[in-house]
Image: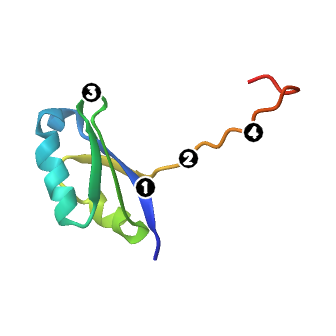
């Protein structure tokens, strides 16, 4: 199975424990890339099958696959 980007939202009551929550996520298999305390968000990479397991981690509010945005190629006829 291919690895995907995963976004984890931490409970607002656990914002101060962001590092602890990130360690718990890593123990479940998430490779943490960023911890954004201001936004209560942890980004990482892992198998899509991990999503249900990550939702059970104490302090996690939600887990979802990360989605990308693709802009069209630059074109003089299309304003950007």
Say the numbered circle drawn on residue 68: 2
Residue at image mark 4: 73
Image quadrant where residue 34 sits: top left
Image quadrant where residue 5 sits: bottom left
For marks 4 and 3 on the same chain, the one whose residue lies earlier in the sequence? 3
Mark 3 Cα shell of 10 Å, populated few (<14), some (14-19), many (≥20): few
Q: What residue is at 25 percent from the left and 48 percent from the top?
A: 60
- Answer left or right for 66 relative to 72: left
Considering the numbered disc 2 on the image, is that residue within a helix, a strand or a loop?
Answer: loop
Residue at image mark 1: 5
Q: What residue is at 74 percent from the left and 39 percent from the top?
A: 72
Give the Cα distance between marks 4 and 1: 24 Å
Residue at image mark 3: 38
Considering the numbered disc 4 on the image, is that residue within a helix, a strand or a loop?
Answer: loop
For marks 1 and 3 on the same chain, the one whose residue lies earlier in the sequence? 1
Give the Cα distance between marks 4 and 3: 33 Å
The answer to whether the residue labelled 2 contacts the one labelled 1, judged by CB atoms less than 8 Å apart, is yes
Give the Cα distance between marks 1 and 3: 20 Å
């Amino acid at each position: 199975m291919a690895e995907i980007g995963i976004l984890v939202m931490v409970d607002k009551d656990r914002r101060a424990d962001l590092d602890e929550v990130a360690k718990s996520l890593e123990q479940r298999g998430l490779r943490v890339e960023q911890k954004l305390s201001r936004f209560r968000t942890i980004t990482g990479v892992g198998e899509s099958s991990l999503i249900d397991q990550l939702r059970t981690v104490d302090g996690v509010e939600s887990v979802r696959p990360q989605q990308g945005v693709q802009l069209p190629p630059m074109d003089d006829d299309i304003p950007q």
